[in-house]
Image: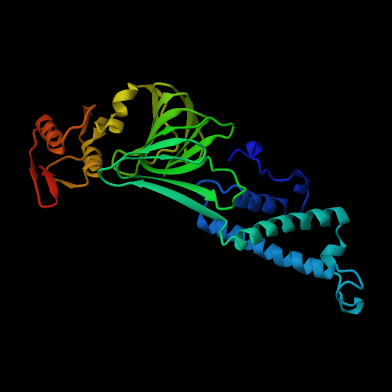
Amino acid sequence: MVRDQSPHSFPPELGDEDDADELERVWDLLTEPRVGSSPEELDEAWALVQDRMGESEAHSSEATPPGEGAAPSERTTPVASAARSPARSASRWWVRGLLAAAAVAALALGLGPLTSITVEAGPGESRSVTLEDGTVVELNSGSSLTQPRWALPWTPPSRGVVLVGEAFFEVAPDEVPFLVETFNARVTVLGTRFNVRARDEIGGGTEVVLKEGRVRLEGARGHTGVELDAGQMSSVALGAAEPAPPAPVEVEPLLSWRARGFAAVDRPLGAILAELERRHGVEIRMGADVDPEDRLTLLYQETRDLRGILGDIATARGLRFRETSQGFEIY
């Protein structure tokens, strides 16, 4: 999250509060839930807002002056409140009231604090979607894109998504960075065109190919990152904490899936067959004598039927393949 660019930044006047750290954490979770925030974190923050609503009501009741509610003999003075200055007490209850108002508004509208939109491209299909900020995303087969967002009408569109699989992005320019999170990496951009492939499988990881503009790629923990220029590729391998140094590549062949072609550069056979399964929606088994770690390169810039691709793989590696009741077997 880039707080200084947020339209809902934490009010600086609350920084002197005794529980400022807690307030800021809840503020961040409830006003700008970051991509990847766990349901437990959001539930905890929401519960705290509800607790503060109760505290605020109690405080108002305790502070009611004589003649406007309970009789003086029935009122008590909280020790904690008596020790506070009027200004600090006012700022405390101001933020409680603001968060309470957000909670009440959401409940009145019948909405929870956070929703998400998920778009999927099933086996054998690709899909294109335009996000609220104007960003266009093309999903490859067997991929999904999730965009966490507030359900309240006055909140701005989210600039973050979670990707499972492969997608090509055309990001709409904006001062607020666009974030793509995968299972082991994060990509940060302002406005550009790039491809992200994220597979948690043999030979997998998160791979970014930049067609236009500039992006930053870092591991999930964000310790070290690299910046890519157009025509470069970098990746965060399975189990790696940091991305590999950017390297020049021929971009168009690696994007051939967008035209229903197929490309695999120095990729394990097991990963290639898994991608073909997703693309064609069939099962492809490997015989016991087939090495799933055997690496090879394939490039089809136009549509090629599955039998033709399997035939090329078998010829290149001295193997055979046959059709089964579920799909194919290569042996």
Left or right placement of residue 256 versus residue 211 in this view: left
Name the spot of residue 44 as percent of width and height, x first.
Answer: 59, 60
Residue closest to the eye, 122 or 85: 122
Residue closest to the eye, 140 or 207: 140
Residue under the image location 73 percent in, 45 percent down = 11
Relative to residue 61, is residue 23 depicted above or below? above
Q: Which color scheme does this rendered protein use? A: rainbow
Left or right placement of residue 34 versus residue 183 in this view: right
Q: How many marks?
A: 0
Left or right placement of residue 160 versus residue 140 in this view: right
Relative to residue 14, is residue 320 depicted above or below? above
Residue closest to the eye, 71 or 92: 71
Residue 13, visible in the rendered structure: yes
Name the spot of residue 248 as percent of width and height, x first.
Answer: 37, 20
Residue closest to the eye, 104 or 195: 104
Name the spot of residue 296 as percent of width and height, x first.
Answer: 21, 30
Residue under the image location 56 percent in, 31 percent down = 174
Left or right placement of residue 288 versus residue 114 in this view: left
Residue under the image location 59 percent in, 60 percent down = 109
Residue 288, visible in the rendered structure: no
Relative to residue 127, is residue 60 depicted above or below? below
Asked where in the image residue 301 lies, by quadrant, the reply is top left
Name the spot of residue 260 as percent of width and height, x first.
Answer: 25, 33
Asked where in the image residue 297 lies, by quadrant, the reply is top left
Q: Quadrant of the N terminus?
A: top right
Q: Quadrant of the C terminus?
A: top left
